Amino acid sequence: MMKHNTIFEALNWASSFLVDNGRDENAARLLLQHILQTNYSGLMMRMHDDITKEQFEQFQSYVEQHAKGRPVQYITGVEEFYGRTFQVDESVLIPRPETEELIVAALERMHKLFEKKASIKLADIGTGSGAIAITMKSELPKLHVTATDISEAALKTAQKNAEILGATIDFRLGDLTEPLKDEKWDVILSNPPYIAYDEAKEMSEVVVEHEPHSALFAEEDGLILYRKLAQQLPNLVNKPALIGVEIGYTQGETVANFFQSSFPQAKIEIVKDINQKNRFVFCEIHV
């Protein structure tokens, strides 16, 4: 085995090893940045520095784990979301860039809908790592944010993130709207599980074998939770109110119809993501 004395040599070895194992070679750089506690430009500047034996052994172990399919984010324990670093582990879904677009679109609509309102109550249903709830609270501190999840382990991870990122969130354990009843809400956001079970065979095993299935898959071709939300939310929202959900790109019309039948007077929008795929449904309820 060749020596990996420098950072450059170590990175070269890892990139080839990952490609040989059918993985993206960029993962090598991310794992090495994590071990050296540096960013991309810092790594580039240190390419000809020596790598210690301990650092290389740690790096080798991480690279081998990823080659076997474990996601980079679970190995490093972190993922960036909306400019903040979130702790992630196997109890939660890894936050996706598309969900950052849900935040942008929600904030835009909220500014118009609630511009004069001093206090806004927001609930994030199925919070996972807490990415949506914590980001919304951090971006708009006047919000009163409640975050729910059916998984106790996920809520623990979300609570840890809220503490680290200094966000005051009311975390509640329970299924869908169960922890929210007997109250009225101004904003409801959710990125529920929306993948049909029979789609699993077409998905990357990195996702299917490592991320929590309860956060990925749902019955009724992935649509059951939207149907239930649309049925349950009319009793739980104020007027005006905003509901925003992330969806699978084929689900726009169906999900929009669920909300239209529950809120006949509402303005319903199917919104595309940066890749021009249907990705969000927004429901604006006016007085």
Image (tube, rainbow, N blue to C red):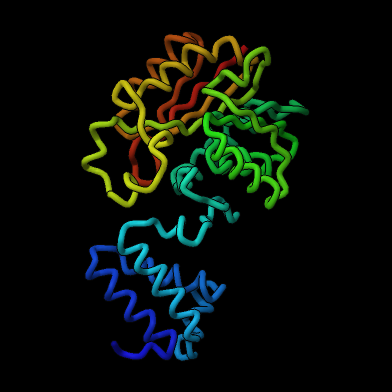
Vertical placement of 76 versus 231: above or below?
Answer: below
The residue furthest right is 118
Please state if 191 lies on the left or on the right of 135 as rendered: left
Residue drawn at point x = 30 percent, y = 60 percent: 68
Vertical placement of 261 versus 141: above or below?
Answer: above
User: Picture coordinates of residue 222 (x, y %)?
Assistant: 33, 27
User: Picture coordinates of residue 268 (x, y %)?
Assistant: 45, 21
User: Picture coordinates of residue 270 (x, y %)?
Assistant: 40, 28
Number of marks present in the image shown: 0
Please state if 86 lies on the left or on the right of 94 as rendered: right
Which is more toward the observer, 238 or 93? 93
Residue drawn at point x = 47 percent, y = 10 percent: 262
Vertical placement of 160 versus 128: above or below?
Answer: below
Vertical placement of 26 versus 112: above or below?
Answer: below
Please state if 273 lies on the left or on the right of 34 as rendered: left
Q: Quadrant of the N terminus?
A: bottom left
Q: Quadrant of the C terminus?
A: top right
Q: Quadrant of residue 38?
A: bottom right
Residue drawn at point x = 59 percent, y = 45 percent: 157
User: Picture coordinates of residue 27 (x, y %)?
Assistant: 38, 66
